[in-house]
Amino acid sequence: MYRGAVIQLLLTESTGQRTIVVEHGPFAIGRGADNQLQLNDAQVSRRHARLVEVSGSWKILDCGSRFGTFVNNDKIDEAILQPGDRIRLGQTELKVFSPDPSTQTSAVDFRHVNALLAGLRALGSGQVLDEVLAIVLDSALEVTGAERGFILLAEAGGALRLRLARARGGITLASAQTSQRIPEEVYATGTDRVVTDLLDEMHASLHAGTVALGIRHVLCTPLRVVQYAAGAERRIGVLYLDSRERGYLQAIGTVHALAAEAAVVIENARLYQQVVEKERVAQELRIAAEIQQALLPPSHYSDDRVELAATSTPCREVGGDLFDYYVREDIGLSFAVADVAGKATSAALLTAVVQGLFAAEAETADNPGDVLTRVNRALCRRAIASRFVTAFYAQLRSNNELQYSNAGHNPPFLLSGDRVTRLEAGGTVLGLFDTGTYEAAQVPFGPGDVVVLFSDGVTEATNPQGEEVGDDRLLSWLLRTRGLSASAILADIKNALGEFCGTEAAHDDVTLMVVKAL
């Protein structure tokens, strides 16, 4: 029979495990708020069962519950509890601890442990992980009297990494030598390891460094989180305690209780830390997106000779496409569209570099081919693995001509009356060969003519059936916009693209520029 002033139960429910210490009865269990132990379980009655102390033993009584009370899978009306018994109420399980009578912790100690466990449960998930680990170790050292405590947590690959080492008095150990084999064995097997004396022949040679510090006694227990819905447990690390004194090894039942609570708190803190880190990255990406959009020029430009409208939408927070335009007194309007290899942050960083290079060269170069040649050389001088860029650069000449050069970019459409021309002259992708040169070509560009620049995110966009937009479909959209302004053409193409793609998410950045001669 279970004799003594207290009974200790390990509660397993959908949210994990926690330890219940009952010092006196009657102790009511149920779904109602007036119970000493309230269970959030739909199959538990409002007043389901109660624990009573009878002649030094503990008895559980069913209170007429709807689904019954079970002890070791037997439905009972009442039963005397013994160490190791499993009580089931609905989907909730309570296991009676099995203390060693010779080393049973006193009621005063249990009250202290219960207070510590309640404190751990009260720690919100918002607590930073390092703070939680310190509280857990300090609690373990205080309750057991061990000299040193270590928490090792499993990383993604399963390897254990020391996260914190503490000594009595809340002292953090900057470096500490301890056994590696014991924690790894405990984590792998999920079984406690108690070493009563490291000087034993079988241990001394394996733990020479620890023995040299005077450490003789080790207690290591797994930290595990119960996934009750899945009927399984997941080990997240180990709690390792050692000392030169042996007495604390008697507190193994207390350590079990502490480890069960600590595992849940640590896991919650780790999950919270991951959420915070994810939000931090998301915030940084939002800021990066704002900066990237701010680096782009206004989406509309016009003077007495030309109207320009452009847009660039990344498929993620930040992208690898850009458009820009430049106005010089001696030449007039120049404009560019570029597409950097890759996506997201790495592409966005290179995009900013490329945009700066174009802006610098646009101030001095008089020929689009020269601009691309110089930008190419500048890129090749940089030790960037994925530095490849497709680009199109053009200058609007005063003699109603458009001079351009194309570096491997999607050839823009030039619509002039009934003629459609693809602007392909130039050279290969930027950043490929430092000796690369780019030719320039000239085409007529008179009043009413329109040139449309676009990235491959436009023509390779797909609808839910997997069909791509393609060059022919894009051209058909353009042909129906004859006579519209540059802004209206851009809006019409964006609407057509949206209708075509429907609910299909974009897989690449989408950039469009429309330039119309007035």
Image: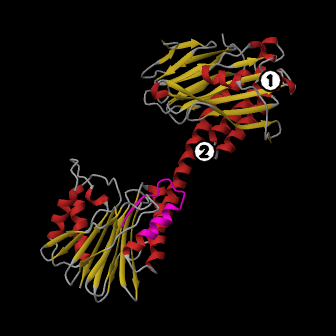
Of 81 and 84, which appears nearest the observer?
84
Q: What is the number of callouts on the image?
A: 2
The residue lying furthest to the front in this view is 435
Q: Quadrant of the N terminus?
A: top right
Quadrant in which residue 390 is drawn: bottom left
Tell whether 171 sits left or right of 296.
right
Picture coordinates of residue 410, whole percent (x, y): 29, 62
The numbered disc on residue 124 is 2
Residue 251 sits in quarter: top right
Q: Is residue 388 magenta?
A: yes
Q: Is residue 330 above or below residue 30?
A: below
Q: Is disc 1 surrounded by few (<14), some (14 to 19) or many (20+) residues within 10 Å?
A: many
Task: Tell whether position 28 is magenta.
Answer: no
In front of the other: 268 or 488: 488
State the residue at coordinates (36%, 66%): 312
Task: Pinpoint residue 192: horizontal percent, then vertical percent.
Answer: 67, 20
Q: For numbered disc 1, what is the local secondary structure?
A: helix
State the SS at label 2. loop
> In the displayed structure, does residue 123 sit left or right of residue 399?
right
User: Which segment did they paint magenta?
Assistant: 373-391
Examine the image and state in which quarter residue 341 appears.
bottom left
Q: Which residue is mark 1?
A: 248
